[in-house]
Image: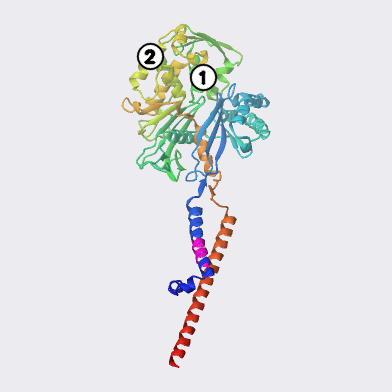
Amino acid sequence: MCLLGLSILGLKALSRTPAIIALVVLILSVVVLVTITLIQFHQKEVLLPGLKYGIVLDAGSSRTTVYVYQWPAEKENNTGVVSQTFKCSVKGSGISSYGKNPQDVPKAFEDCMQKVQGQIPAHLHRSTRIYLGATAGMRLLRLQNETAANEVLASIQNYFKSQPFDFRGAQIISGQEEGIYGWITANYLMGNFLEKNLWHMWVHPNGVETTGALDLGGASTQISFAAGDKVGMNSSHIMKVSLYGYVYSLYTHSFQCYGRNEAEKRFLAILLQDSPTKTNLINPCYPRNYLTTFTGGYIFDSLCTADLRPVGYNPDDIITVGGTGDPSLCREKVASLFDFTACRDQEACSFDGVYQPKVKGTFVAFAGFYYTASAFNLSGSFSLSAFNSSSWDFCSESWSQLPLLLPRFDEVYARSYCFSAHYIYHLLVNGYRFTEETWPQIYFKKEVGNSSIAWSLGYMLSLTNRIPAESPLIRLPMDPPAFVGTLAFFTAVALLCLAFLVYLCASSGKQRRSQHAFDHTVDSE
């Protein structure tokens, strides 16, 4: 009101220079205060805290693979949005093969670890966690010789302590964990956990069903899929998994000794039992005209074939194996690896009397499943009849024709593709009970985008639940101390100007009243 009164005090009061200056400074101070406040809070820049890295070594039964993963440091619903940035295959066989010379394990890692160091910024090496997870090969070695298994792990521990990364230990994961992590990987890469909306924010997709996972390794095979509501939760095969704020109920089971390599050793041992001689063996699953030799130790030193060892077994015995390329007989013989009668016509059962709900929905078949189908020029989704006809044609070829059929020829793999095909048939059809109608719902894949389908990615996703997130950084146009100082200064100036103007207003009013009284007195005289 004083300011309003000031405007009508008359030109005499307003013409005073101090009043005009005070009024201008007050208006400018208010404008500056409003402007810097709006800029400070509406032009701020949110800086994400950058990337975090993690390294997982997948120590399988036949090989070790090193994966480098990265994710935004602020994470998403407590789980990192992880992507694979690098992959390196360690030369040589799996770490379980070093049971007799554990000191040699680190030498195999050296080449890959040198490459890994170049993939991660040097200033992040110390904060980058590295994990080694060993699967069925080491599970078998631990059962067979626990001391040897511990010495292998100890050798690995000592090696990684000298590396520039934050080593979090080498452990043997269970078959159930391997199955769960494989399921997490498959669904994460298929986009079943997260998707970006129109605003480029990660959200949970609506109405998306999860995908089952089928993993065929060298020493074990795993099946995992979301269990239905009617499945009893008291089963030891049903697990709860929490990811991205959602909880999933999974059926998962790992069949030890049913990996491709161990299954083939068991198959050779069974054929040897039925052979009239113990040094010569006919294998209907090996290509026609193929001939090779094995030592007795190659077949029978495994824990998976220990109960099939012949009397008077000598690990140095030489066994000659000849192939006949007979797909019909191969399929018939391979069935002996499974005990399909143990289920006794139970519907919720696979083989060997193991509980399994009925399979439903889509599945991703990776690792050995993919590589076998790929040898027959099959990938993705295809019919059971297409798989049978392709495998039949392949198994009927002679050994000399295989280098012409396979884009990458390797004797060890090439001789076994026929066995693998019939083994996969029995496992999926008679074991897991996929039918002609449900088989096309299986997608044989190696990777999605640039990320491999392997349990290691699911392992990393699970681990990021326990890695602390970092808060986003906010960059303001002005540093907080400078902003507060500027705000205080112009506020003080504005208050002083206002006080000065109020003072002028009050003084002018008092002077006017005095003048009015004086004029009234003069008039009365």
The image quadrant of residue 333 is top left
Percent position (x, y) of residue 190? 41, 33
| Residue assigned mark 1 | 265
Q: Residue 87 carries which label?
A: none
Which kind of residue does numbered mark 2 sit on?
Trp
Number of residues whose C-alpha sits closer than 10 Å to that of mark 1, classed few (under 14), some (14–19) or many (20 or more): some
Which kind of residue does numbered mark 1 sit on?
Lys
Seen at 53% across and 31% down, the residue is 85
The image quadrant of residue 141 is top right
| Local secondary structure at mark 1 | helix
Magenta-drawn segment: 22-30
Q: Residue 37: say if magenta.
A: no
Most extreme residue toward the bottom is 525
Camera-side residue of 393 and 339:
393
| Residue assigned mark 2 | 392
Q: How far apart are marks 1 and 2 (CA)?
A: 22 Å
